[in-house]
Image (spheres, helix red, strand yellow):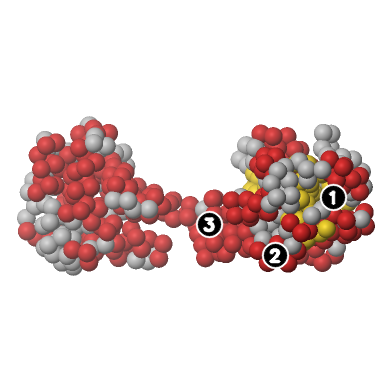
Amino acid sequence: MKIIRSTGKKVPEGAAARPNAWKLLVVDDEPDVRQLTTISLRNFEFSGRELQLLQADSAAQAKLVLQEHPDIAVALIDVVMETDDAGLKLVEHIRNVMENRMMRLVIRTGQPGMAPERFVIDHYDIDDYRDKTELTVQKLYATVRLALKSYRDLQTIDLNRQGLGRILAVTPDLYDLHRDKLEDYFRGVLMQLIGICRLGQSGMISTIDGMVMTVEGRDVRIRAGAGDFEEGEANEARRSQIVDLCTRVVTGQTVPEGLRAGAAVVPLGVGKHVFGFVYLEAAGEMSLADRELIQVLANQCAAGLENFKLHHSLEESYEEAIDMLGQVAEFKDSATGAHIRRIQEYTYRLARELEIDEALAVAYGKASRLHDIGNVGIPDLILRKPGRLTAEEFAIIQQHSLIGDAILKRSPAMALARLVARSHHEQWNGSGYPDGASGEDIPMVARLVAVVDVFDALMSTRPYKGPWQLDVAVSEIERGSGSHFDPRVVAAFLNLYRQGKFLDLIAKAVAPTPAMPTFD
C-alpha cells in the first residue's frame, strides 16, 4: 500500500479553500486597542491557517462569545473593564466554570498597578502577562504565535490521549470486536493520526466491503469521521463526495480532481486486497515521517478490521453449527422440534429478566437449542413410546445428557451448549442427573433451561400425554422452587409470566404441531 497525495488541482464546489482558522478573542473596553490589535494581526497566519478575530468590550460580553465559540484558541484579556478585576474574574470563569484548560490566556493591562505581574502569575492560571505599552506590532505577533503554538501542541497531546484511550479500551477485546467497539477503535486511530501529524481537524476512515451479493455495486461504510466529516446532515454532502472520490483512488490508484491540496488518501488492505481507505486533510505539506506514521496506523486499522471479519466469520460458523445440530434434533423427534425453538426464546427472556448481559443472554438462548441433542443416541422406540416408560427405559432416556456432552465436547466453541446438554436435568436439591449436582454448582444456563424446559414440556402435546392446563403447569413450576429449581430463576419466571410476557410462546406450545417430513 502507498499514500496517494492530492496535488489540489481543483477544490470541490462550496468547500472552503483553507481549513478552519485559529480563533483569537480580544477582550478590552477600549475600542482603539481592539482596532489596533485587528490591524496588527491583519495578515497573520500560523501553520497554514489564518486567524479569525472575535471581540468583546467587557467580561460579560466575552462570556457570551465564549458560549458561541467554545473552540477559541487564544484570548487577549484586559484586567480593568466594568470592574477593576473583571479580566481576572473572566480568567477564573474560563478555567474553573467552563473547565477549559486548553485555551491560552494572555493578560494585557494598561494599569499594571491594579494587577501586579507577579501576583497575577502566581494566583491565576494564565499563560502570559503583558503591559499594553510593550505590545508593539512585532511583540504582539510573537506573543500570539507562541500562544497558538502552545495551543496546537496541547491539542495534539489531547487528541493523542483520547485516541490512545479508545485504542487501549478496545485492545483487550480485539478478538471479540462488535461493531460499536470496532468503530471506537477506528476513531482512536483517527485521533492519533490527526494529533501526531498535526493535520488540522478533518479526517475520515471508511471501508469498502467489496462486491455485495446484488448488482447494486460497492457497499461503502464510513467507520469514523472528524471535523468536516463527523456525522450530521450538514456534512453529509461533503462526506458522500469524498467517499466517491477516495473509492476511485484506492480501487484505481489514481488521484481524481476534486480533493483539496494537501489531502492524503491511504489505502486500507491486506496484501493486494484493498477494502477501505483513510482520508486526511492537512493544513500544509506532510513530511516523509508523517506519511510513514500514517501508513503504520493505517496498517493497524487494516489489521483491526481483518480481525473483526475473521471473528465474525467464526461466529457465523458457530451459529450455523448450532442451527444444523438443532435441525438434527428436530428430525429425530418431531414432537420436540418446535419445543427447541421456543426454549431458545424462553431462555433469552428469562436471562434478561435476571439482568444477565444482552450478549450472554443471546448466547444462553442459542446454547439452549442443543439441550436435547443427545436424543439422537436414544432408540426411537423409547423416545417416541406413547405409554409410561419402564425403569430400564427411563435409565436409557437419562443417557441423553451424557450423549449430548460427548457429542459437543469435540468443539471448544460448543462449551456453553455442552453445559446445557449435560446439566439441564440437574436439580437444585441434588436429586437430578447425571452428576447429582446441586445449588450454585449447577451452571446458570442449565438452571434457566431446567425451568423453561419443564414448563414448555408440560404445556405441549407429547406422544405420551396431552397439554396441561396453564394454571396447573405454572403451579408445578412454583411448587418446584427450592427443590427442583433455583428459587431465583423461578421468581423471575413467575414475574414474566404474570406480566404476560410468555403468552406468545405458550400459544405456540398448545397449537397443533405440523408433522415433520419422513423419508423412505
| Circle nearer the viewer, 1 or 3 | 1
Distance between mark 2 and mark 1 Cα atoms: 35 Å
How many C-alpha atoms fall within 10 Å of the one at disc 1: few (<14), some, or many (≥20)?
some
- Name the one closer to the observer, 288 or 254: 288
273 relative to 135 in the view: left or right: left
Q: Quadrant of the N terminus?
A: bottom right
| Circle nearer the viewer, 2 or 1 | 2
* Callout 2 secondary element: helix
- Where is residue 119 drawn, in percent x and y? 70, 65
64 relative to 471 in the view: left or right: right
**Which of the two labelled residues, at mark 2 and mark 1, occupies the earlier sequence position?**
1
Give the residue type at disc 1. Answer: Arg
Q: Is residue 244 above or below residue 111?
A: above
- Name the one closer to the observer, 515 or 123: 123
297 relative to 377 in the view: left or right: right
Q: In the rendered image, which residue does mark 1 sit on?
A: 49
Give the residue type at disc 3. Answer: Leu
Work out whether residue 207 can be spotted. no
How many C-alpha atoms fall within 10 Å of the one at disc 3: few (<14), some, or many (≥20)?
many
- Residue at position x 40%, y 65% in the image: 412
